[in-house]
Protein backbone atom coordinates (compact mmCIF):
# COMPACT_ATOMS: atom_id res chain seq x y z
CA UNK A 1 0.00 0.00 0.00
CA UNK A 2 2.86 2.36 0.77
CA UNK A 3 4.03 2.22 -2.85
CA UNK A 4 0.62 3.30 -4.13
CA UNK A 5 0.10 6.04 -1.52
CA UNK A 6 3.57 7.40 -2.19
CA UNK A 7 2.87 7.54 -5.92
CA UNK A 8 -0.41 9.36 -5.25
CA UNK A 9 1.46 11.89 -3.10
CA UNK A 10 4.10 12.43 -5.78
CA UNK A 11 1.44 12.87 -8.47
CA UNK A 12 -0.38 15.48 -6.37
CA UNK A 13 2.92 17.26 -5.70
CA UNK A 14 3.63 17.31 -9.43
CA UNK A 15 0.15 18.65 -10.21
CA UNK A 16 -0.02 21.13 -7.32
CA UNK A 17 -1.11 24.60 -8.34
CA UNK A 18 -2.04 23.71 -11.91
CA UNK A 19 -4.91 25.92 -13.02
CA UNK A 20 -7.58 23.63 -14.49
CA UNK A 21 -9.22 26.62 -16.19
CA UNK A 22 -6.09 27.82 -17.97
CA UNK A 23 -6.29 27.21 -21.71
CA UNK A 24 -4.39 24.09 -22.74
CA UNK A 25 -3.44 22.94 -19.23
CA UNK A 26 -5.70 19.87 -19.34
CA UNK A 27 -4.31 18.76 -22.70
CA UNK A 28 -0.75 18.88 -21.31
CA UNK A 29 -1.55 16.62 -18.35
CA UNK A 30 0.21 13.30 -17.82
CA UNK A 31 1.15 10.78 -15.17
CA UNK A 32 4.67 10.92 -13.76
CA UNK A 33 6.92 7.79 -13.96
CA UNK A 34 6.23 6.78 -10.33
CA UNK A 35 2.51 6.82 -11.02
CA UNK A 36 2.94 4.84 -14.25
CA UNK A 37 4.91 2.24 -12.31
CA UNK A 38 2.18 1.99 -9.63
CA UNK A 39 -0.53 1.71 -12.29
CA UNK A 40 1.27 -1.29 -13.73
CA UNK A 41 0.92 -3.03 -10.37
CA UNK A 42 -2.76 -2.30 -9.67
CA UNK A 43 -3.55 -5.96 -10.32
CA UNK A 44 -1.66 -6.80 -7.12
CA UNK A 45 -4.22 -5.18 -4.80
CA UNK A 46 -7.71 -6.38 -3.89
CA UNK A 47 -10.98 -4.41 -3.99
CA UNK A 48 -10.80 -3.35 -0.32
CA UNK A 49 -7.29 -1.97 -0.74
CA UNK A 50 -8.36 -0.14 -3.89
CA UNK A 51 -11.22 1.50 -1.98
CA UNK A 52 -8.74 2.69 0.63
CA UNK A 53 -6.64 4.26 -2.12
CA UNK A 54 -9.70 5.86 -3.70
CA UNK A 55 -10.61 7.42 -0.35
CA UNK A 56 -7.02 8.58 0.08
CA UNK A 57 -6.89 10.19 -3.37
CA UNK A 58 -10.29 11.84 -2.85
CA UNK A 59 -9.25 13.38 0.46
CA UNK A 60 -5.94 14.58 -0.99
CA UNK A 61 -7.78 16.19 -3.88
CA UNK A 62 -10.08 18.08 -1.49
CA UNK A 63 -7.12 19.21 0.57
CA UNK A 64 -5.23 20.31 -2.55
CA UNK A 65 -8.14 22.35 -3.88
CA UNK A 66 -8.62 24.09 -0.52
CA UNK A 67 -4.90 24.89 -0.38
CA UNK A 68 -5.42 26.91 -3.56
CA UNK A 69 -8.62 28.61 -2.40
CA UNK A 70 -9.71 28.33 1.24
CA UNK A 71 -13.22 29.50 0.30
CA UNK A 72 -14.02 26.42 -1.75
CA UNK A 73 -16.88 24.55 -0.12
CA UNK A 74 -17.63 20.88 -0.70
CA UNK A 75 -20.75 19.41 0.87
CA UNK A 76 -21.36 15.67 1.26
CA UNK A 77 -22.88 15.38 -2.23
CA UNK A 78 -19.88 17.14 -3.77
CA UNK A 79 -17.50 14.83 -1.95
CA UNK A 80 -19.49 11.79 -3.04
CA UNK A 81 -19.34 12.96 -6.66
CA UNK A 82 -15.58 13.49 -6.38
CA UNK A 83 -15.10 9.99 -5.01
CA UNK A 84 -17.06 8.64 -7.97
CA UNK A 85 -14.61 10.43 -10.28
CA UNK A 86 -11.69 8.68 -8.61
CA UNK A 87 -13.51 5.36 -8.68
CA UNK A 88 -13.91 5.85 -12.43
CA UNK A 89 -10.25 6.81 -12.73
CA UNK A 90 -9.05 3.63 -11.02
CA UNK A 91 -11.35 1.55 -13.20
CA UNK A 92 -10.05 3.19 -16.37
CA UNK A 93 -6.43 2.68 -15.27
CA UNK A 94 -7.07 -1.01 -14.63
CA UNK A 95 -8.88 -1.62 -17.91
CA UNK A 96 -6.89 0.62 -20.28
CA UNK A 97 -3.29 0.85 -19.03
CA UNK A 98 -2.04 1.55 -22.55
CA UNK A 99 -4.01 4.80 -22.85
CA UNK A 100 -2.58 6.74 -19.90
CA UNK A 101 -2.28 10.13 -21.60
CA UNK A 102 -5.91 10.01 -22.73
CA UNK A 103 -7.02 8.92 -19.26
CA UNK A 104 -5.06 11.74 -17.61
CA UNK A 105 -6.71 14.34 -19.88
CA UNK A 106 -10.15 12.75 -19.33
CA UNK A 107 -9.68 12.77 -15.56
CA UNK A 108 -8.58 16.42 -15.38
CA UNK A 109 -11.52 17.39 -17.61
CA UNK A 110 -13.82 15.62 -15.13
CA UNK A 111 -12.19 17.45 -12.22
CA UNK A 112 -12.57 20.77 -14.02
CA UNK A 113 -16.27 20.16 -14.68
CA UNK A 114 -16.81 18.96 -11.09
CA UNK A 115 -15.16 22.07 -9.66
CA UNK A 116 -17.23 24.32 -11.96
CA UNK A 117 -20.43 22.67 -10.75
CA UNK A 118 -19.59 22.67 -7.03
CA UNK A 119 -17.98 26.13 -6.90
CA UNK A 120 -19.20 28.13 -9.93
CA UNK A 121 -17.12 31.19 -9.03
CA UNK A 122 -13.91 29.20 -9.67
CA UNK A 123 -14.16 29.36 -13.47
CA UNK A 124 -14.80 33.11 -13.44
CA UNK A 125 -11.94 33.67 -11.02
CA UNK A 126 -9.26 31.54 -12.66
CA UNK A 127 -9.95 31.33 -16.40
CA UNK A 128 -7.80 34.42 -17.04
CA UNK A 129 -5.10 33.50 -14.51
CA UNK A 130 -1.71 31.93 -15.20
CA UNK A 131 -1.22 28.21 -15.65
CA UNK A 132 0.19 27.83 -12.13
CA UNK A 133 -1.61 29.23 -9.06
CA UNK A 134 0.31 29.72 -5.84
CA UNK A 135 -1.25 28.04 -2.78
CA UNK A 136 -2.89 30.30 -0.20
CA UNK A 137 -0.76 30.97 2.88
CA UNK A 138 -2.96 29.50 5.62
CA UNK A 139 -0.53 28.47 8.30
CA UNK A 140 -1.72 27.90 11.86
CA UNK A 141 -1.00 30.75 14.24
CA UNK A 142 0.74 30.03 17.51
CA UNK A 143 -1.58 29.33 20.47
CA UNK A 144 -0.21 32.38 22.30
CA UNK A 145 -1.03 34.69 19.39
CA UNK A 146 -4.54 33.26 19.02
CA UNK A 147 -5.17 33.68 22.75
CA UNK A 148 -4.14 37.33 22.51
CA UNK A 149 -6.18 38.06 19.37
CA UNK A 150 -9.30 36.34 20.67
CA UNK A 151 -9.22 37.96 24.14
CA UNK A 152 -9.07 34.63 25.99
CA UNK A 153 -8.25 34.68 29.70
CA UNK A 154 -6.79 31.23 30.29
CA UNK A 155 -7.13 31.70 34.06
CA UNK A 156 -10.89 32.20 33.87
CA UNK A 157 -11.95 30.53 30.62
CA UNK A 158 -15.11 28.46 31.04
CA UNK A 159 -15.17 24.97 29.62
CA UNK A 160 -15.69 22.93 27.75
CA UNK A 161 -14.03 24.83 24.89
CA UNK A 162 -14.64 24.24 21.18
CA UNK A 163 -12.24 25.62 18.55
CA UNK A 164 -13.98 25.91 15.17
CA UNK A 165 -11.54 25.56 12.27
CA UNK A 166 -8.78 24.44 14.61
CA UNK A 167 -6.31 23.68 11.83
CA UNK A 168 -4.72 20.39 10.85
CA UNK A 169 -2.62 20.18 14.01
CA UNK A 170 -5.11 21.73 16.46
CA UNK A 171 -2.41 23.82 18.14
CA UNK A 172 -4.74 25.90 20.30
CA UNK A 173 -6.69 22.81 21.36
CA UNK A 174 -3.60 20.97 22.54
CA UNK A 175 -2.24 24.09 24.23
CA UNK A 176 -5.40 24.64 26.27
CA UNK A 177 -5.64 20.95 27.14
CA UNK A 178 -2.07 21.20 28.37
CA UNK A 179 -3.29 23.87 30.79
CA UNK A 180 -5.91 21.47 32.12
CA UNK A 181 -8.82 23.01 30.17
CA UNK A 182 -11.27 20.59 28.53
CA UNK A 183 -10.98 21.56 24.87
CA UNK A 184 -12.03 20.12 21.52
CA UNK A 185 -11.55 21.16 17.92
CA UNK A 186 -13.16 20.61 14.52
CA UNK A 187 -11.70 21.14 11.07
CA UNK A 188 -12.33 19.69 7.62
CA UNK A 189 -8.67 18.64 7.45
CA UNK A 190 -7.37 17.52 10.81
CA UNK A 191 -5.25 14.79 12.35
CA UNK A 192 -8.05 13.18 14.38
CA UNK A 193 -7.59 12.10 17.97
CA UNK A 194 -9.76 12.07 21.10
CA UNK A 195 -9.94 15.88 21.08
CA UNK A 196 -9.95 16.67 17.33
CA UNK A 197 -12.71 15.73 14.88
CA UNK A 198 -12.88 16.02 11.11
CA UNK A 199 -16.04 17.99 10.37
CA UNK A 200 -17.43 20.85 8.30
CA UNK A 201 -18.49 23.72 10.55
CA UNK A 202 -21.73 24.11 8.57
CA UNK A 203 -22.83 20.53 9.24
CA UNK A 204 -21.44 20.06 12.76
CA UNK A 205 -24.07 19.67 15.48
CA UNK A 206 -23.17 22.21 18.18
CA UNK A 207 -25.92 21.26 20.63
CA UNK A 208 -27.79 23.55 23.03
CA UNK A 209 -26.23 25.28 26.06
CA UNK A 210 -23.29 22.87 25.76
CA UNK A 211 -20.14 24.98 25.46
CA UNK A 212 -18.57 27.35 27.96
CA UNK A 213 -16.33 28.91 25.31
CA UNK A 214 -16.18 28.72 21.52
CA UNK A 215 -13.26 30.11 19.51
CA UNK A 216 -12.51 30.65 15.82
CA UNK A 217 -9.54 32.67 14.63
CA UNK A 218 -9.71 33.66 10.94
CA UNK A 219 -12.06 30.75 10.44
CA UNK A 220 -15.84 30.75 10.61
CA UNK A 221 -16.33 34.53 10.62
CA UNK A 222 -13.78 35.02 7.83
CA UNK A 223 -15.72 32.62 5.60
CA UNK A 224 -19.07 34.06 6.70
CA UNK A 225 -17.90 37.49 5.61
CA UNK A 226 -16.70 36.09 2.28
CA UNK A 227 -20.09 34.52 1.56
CA UNK A 228 -21.88 37.69 2.70
CA UNK A 229 -20.04 39.65 0.01
CA UNK A 230 -20.64 37.11 -2.78
CA UNK A 231 -23.80 37.28 -4.88
CA UNK A 232 -23.95 33.48 -4.98
CA UNK A 233 -22.68 32.98 -1.42
CA UNK A 234 -24.15 30.68 1.23
CA UNK A 235 -24.80 33.62 3.55
CA UNK A 236 -28.17 32.32 4.76
CA UNK A 237 -26.62 28.97 5.81
CA UNK A 238 -23.85 30.86 7.61
CA UNK A 239 -26.32 33.16 9.38
CA UNK A 240 -28.35 30.19 10.63
CA UNK A 241 -25.22 28.39 11.80
CA UNK A 242 -23.96 31.57 13.50
CA UNK A 243 -27.12 31.72 15.62
CA UNK A 244 -26.87 27.99 16.30
CA UNK A 245 -23.35 28.53 17.62
CA UNK A 246 -24.50 31.33 19.92
CA UNK A 247 -27.36 29.19 21.22
CA UNK A 248 -24.97 26.32 21.89
CA UNK A 249 -23.25 28.45 24.55
CA UNK A 250 -24.03 27.95 28.19
CA UNK A 251 -25.53 30.95 29.96
CA UNK A 252 -22.49 33.08 30.73
CA UNK A 253 -20.48 31.38 27.98
CA UNK A 254 -18.77 33.29 25.18
CA UNK A 255 -17.92 33.05 21.48
CA UNK A 256 -14.51 34.53 20.60
CA UNK A 257 -13.73 35.13 16.93
CA UNK A 258 -11.95 37.33 14.40
CA UNK A 259 -12.62 39.15 12.16
CA UNK A 260 -15.84 40.82 13.26
CA UNK A 261 -19.24 40.54 11.55
CA UNK A 262 -20.93 43.94 11.98
CA UNK A 263 -23.64 43.17 9.42
CA UNK A 264 -25.16 40.53 11.73
CA UNK A 265 -23.85 41.58 15.16
CA UNK A 266 -25.93 44.77 14.97
CA UNK A 267 -29.11 42.67 15.01
CA UNK A 268 -28.32 40.59 18.11
CA UNK A 269 -30.69 40.98 21.05
CA UNK A 270 -28.77 43.10 23.59
CA UNK A 271 -30.83 41.51 26.32
CA UNK A 272 -29.42 38.10 25.42
CA UNK A 273 -25.93 38.84 24.13
CA UNK A 274 -23.16 41.27 25.08
CA UNK A 275 -20.78 42.17 22.24
CA UNK A 276 -17.23 43.33 23.01
CA UNK A 277 -14.81 44.31 20.24
CA UNK A 278 -11.12 45.13 20.11
CA UNK A 279 -9.00 46.58 17.30
CA UNK A 280 -6.19 44.25 16.25
CA UNK A 281 -3.16 45.63 14.41
CA UNK A 282 -5.25 48.05 12.38
CA UNK A 283 -8.63 49.73 12.68
CA UNK A 284 -10.44 47.60 10.08
CA UNK A 285 -9.57 44.29 11.74
CA UNK A 286 -11.34 43.52 15.01
CA UNK A 287 -11.72 40.56 17.29
CA UNK A 288 -15.06 39.91 18.97
CA UNK A 289 -16.24 38.37 22.21
CA UNK A 290 -19.95 37.64 22.46
CA UNK A 291 -21.17 36.64 25.90
CA UNK A 292 -24.50 34.90 26.25
CA UNK A 293 -26.49 36.58 29.01
CA UNK A 294 -29.62 34.45 29.07
Image (cartoon, helix red, strand yellow):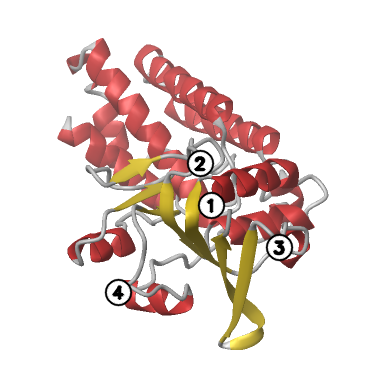
Where residue 95 sits, quadrant-wise, is: top left
Which type of secondary structure does the marked residue at label 4 adopt?
A: loop
Mark 2 closeness class: few <14, some 14–19, many ≥20 residues within 10 Å: some
Q: Earlier in the sequence, mark 3 or mark 2?
A: 2
- Coordinates of residue 21 in the picture (x, y in percent): 67, 47
Determine the residue positioned at 71% across, 52% down.
227
- Place of residue 151 in the rendered image (x, y in percent of width and height, measured from the top left): 46, 76
Q: Which residue is mark 2?
A: 29
The first of marks 4 and 3 along the sequence is 4
**Residue 214 position by quadrant:** bottom left
Distance from label 4 to label 1 (Cα)?
Answer: 47 Å
Give the residue number, with chain letter if any, for mark 4: 155
Q: Which residue is mark 3?
A: 270
Tell us which disc is closer to us: 4 or 3: 3
Residue mark closest to the camera, 4 vs 2 = 4
First in sequence: mark 1 vs mark 3: 1
* Residue 233, position as x, y percentages in the image: 74, 47
Quarter of the N terminus within the rendering:
top left
Asked whether residue 131 is in view, the answer is no
Q: Nearer the viewer, mark 1 or mark 3?
A: 3
Amino acid sequence: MNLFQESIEKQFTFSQGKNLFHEGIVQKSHFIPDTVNAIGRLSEIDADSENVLIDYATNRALETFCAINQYYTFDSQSQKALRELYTGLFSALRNNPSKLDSIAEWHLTNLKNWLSETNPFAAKLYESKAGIIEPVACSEYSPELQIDILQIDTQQVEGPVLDIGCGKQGKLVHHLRGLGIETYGIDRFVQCDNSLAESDWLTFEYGTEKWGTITSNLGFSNHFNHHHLRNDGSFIAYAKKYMEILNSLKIGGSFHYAPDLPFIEQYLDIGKFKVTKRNIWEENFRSVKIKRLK
